[in-house]
Image (cartoon, rainbow, N blue to C red):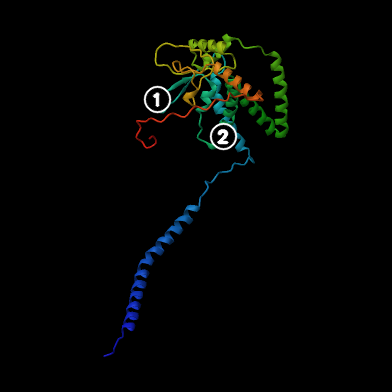
Amino acid sequence: MASITPLSFASSSKTNSLETLSSFSSISSSPLGHRRQNVVLQKRSSLKVKSMAKEIYLNKDGNAIKKLQAGVNKLADLVGVTLGPKGRNVVLESKYGSPKIVNDGVTVAKEVELEDPVENIGAKLVRQAASKTNDLAGDGTTTSVVLAQGLITEGVKVVAAGANPIQITRGIEKTTKALVEELKKMSKEVEDSELADVAAVSAGNNLEIGSMIAEAMSKVGRKGVVTLEEGRSADNYLYVVEGMQFDRGYLSPYFVTDSEKMTVVRCCLEHASSVAKTFLTSDAVVVEIKEPEPAPLANPMDNSGYGY
């Protein structure tokens, strides 16, 4: 029988414990390695972003221009029916309500989405011209669409005949500048009655609302702000607000000088400016020296320890 010393027993037990721990670690580290590998694979897969493929249309055979022109014609033919004093209405489908009946060119143009992607790009080009016209002038959107259709139609014919498209575009730019100068000479100031007609068209040919908007424009000026809100009653009302309005209150309640009316009186600014002027223009300060006040006499009845 072999004798085992405590030291050798301790070392052997320590070795067994290490083997046990290593076996446990080898068992637990195997799924952890798989998890780490999965995380690395997930990170690598998440970094791979596939961009969507795009189809390229070259104008070698003229198909690209034809499709663009087809989109322009579809939009212009639809918007063109609203042109002029005898313009007709267009019925627009609404997914979440009743159909809309409009007579405004830019409103109709915003609702057009064509199925063919190339034709839709052509429609968007003409729609952009209508939107810019609406932002700058507020009217003439249908005219801009019809003019764009005519320029594109005649330009495609000339290019197909062998003309240089760059020279054609430069000629269009020069002609546009000359026509604008002539139109400025022929232009005249818009009257309030004409503003009422324009507003009535935007309001669905409602002459009452158009006249009310024209009256508001005459009161606030051509550069004033007119806000149109949907009312909850059957009548229409016009409110003219003098001054400025803010969507928030005072930054601090201490700005208020009249607590009953919660207003800031103008004279407070005058007082503040006079105080600042006095402060900045003063070179000397004269202060009256006060005599020191006599120390109070001790109260003999006071037992706080400071008296007798």
Left or right: where 28 falls relative to 286: left
Residue at (54, 34) in percent of width and height? 120
Report the residue marked by disc 2.
Answer: 121
Mark closest to the chain's N terminus, 2 or 1: 1
Q: Nearer the viewer, residue 72 or 170?
A: 170
In the image, residue 27 sits, relative to residue 266, either above or below, namely: below
- Residue 30 image position (x, y, % from top left): 38, 66
Left or right: where 215 falls relative to 172: left
Quadrant placement of the N terminus? bottom left
Q: Residues within 10 Å of mark 1 (few under 14, many from 20)?
A: few
Q: Residues within 10 Å of mark 2 (few under 14, many from 20)?
A: some
Report the residue marked by disc 1.
Answer: 97
Identity of the amino acid at label 1?
Gly
- Could you give the CA–CA distance between mark 2 and mark 1, rounded to whole angstroms? 28 Å
User: Which quarter of the picture shows residue 214?
Assistant: top right
- Residue 163 visible (yes or no): no
Quadrant placement of the C terminus? top left
| Marking on residue 273 | none
Residue at (71, 34) in percent of width and height? 166
- Residue sitting at the far front: 308
Q: Nearer the viewer, residue 250 or 15?
A: 250
Q: Nearer the viewer, residue 187 or 287?
A: 287
Instruction: Tell me the SS state at disc 2.
Output: helix
User: Which quarter of the picture shows residue 195?
Assistant: top right
- Residue 288 image position (x, y, % from top left): 58, 23
